[in-house]
């Protein structure tokens, strides 16, 4: 349970860094009396949705795209990660708060690269117990 919460927080921090660096990625704050609490809540919920998308949809897409991933020597994985970011953006548009990604080509691809790097570094610093 602690590992799951830690993974959601790491996803939220990685998405916050991508939103901070790229102007095309924004997170709308949750309705709250305090704007900071609403923004933290929004990042945590978006991190949870992003984690669920990566846990459920990404393995299926990765398996189906295995030939093109091998053909591009793994570079297509970045496109898959960008697609998961866009899917998270689409899923959270139905909430009163959430993630918004403007363009697939620059915003989602570079955002996926940022999220992947930060998630890898944070996962390396704070490994989950297995």
Image (cartoon, helix red, strand yellow):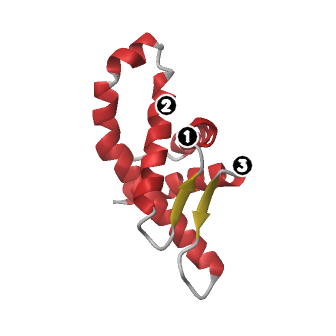
- Give how far apart the Cα atoms at labels 2 and 3 are: 19 Å
- Please identify the quadrant where the C terminus is shown: top left
C-alpha gap between disc 1 and disc 2? 9 Å
Which mark identifies residue 21?
A: 3
Q: How many marks?
A: 3
Is residue 35 placed above or below 2 in the rendered structure?
Answer: below
Residue 41 visible somewhere in the drawing = yes
Q: For this rendering, which residue is in front, 19 or 12?
A: 19
Q: Is residue 130 visible?
A: no
- The residue pinned by badge 1 equals 104
Mark toward the viewer: 1 or 3? 1
Residue under label 2:
79
Q: Quadrant of residue 35?
A: bottom right
Mark linked to residue 88: none
First in residue order: circle 1 vs circle 2: 2
Q: Secondary structure at mark 3?
A: helix
Left or right position of 34 against 72: right
Residue drawn where x is 55% and y is 40% of the image: 104
């Amino acid at each position: 349970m602690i590992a799951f919460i830690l993974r959601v927080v790491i996803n939220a921090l990685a998405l916050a860094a991508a939103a901070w660096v790229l102007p095309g990625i924004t997170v709308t704050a949750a309705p709250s009396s305090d704007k900071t609490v609403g923004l933290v809540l929004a990042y945590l919920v978006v991190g949870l949705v992003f984690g669920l998308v990566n846990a459920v949809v990404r393995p299926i897409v990765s398996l189906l795209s295995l030939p093109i991933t091998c053909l591009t020597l793994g570079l297509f994985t970045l496109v898959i990660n960008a697609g998961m970011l866009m899917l998270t953006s689409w899923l959270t548009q139905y909430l009163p708060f959430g993630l918004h990604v403007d363009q697939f080509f620059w915003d989602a691809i570079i955002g996926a690269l940022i999220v992947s790097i930060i998630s890898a570094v944070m996962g390396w610093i704070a490994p989950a117990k297995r």
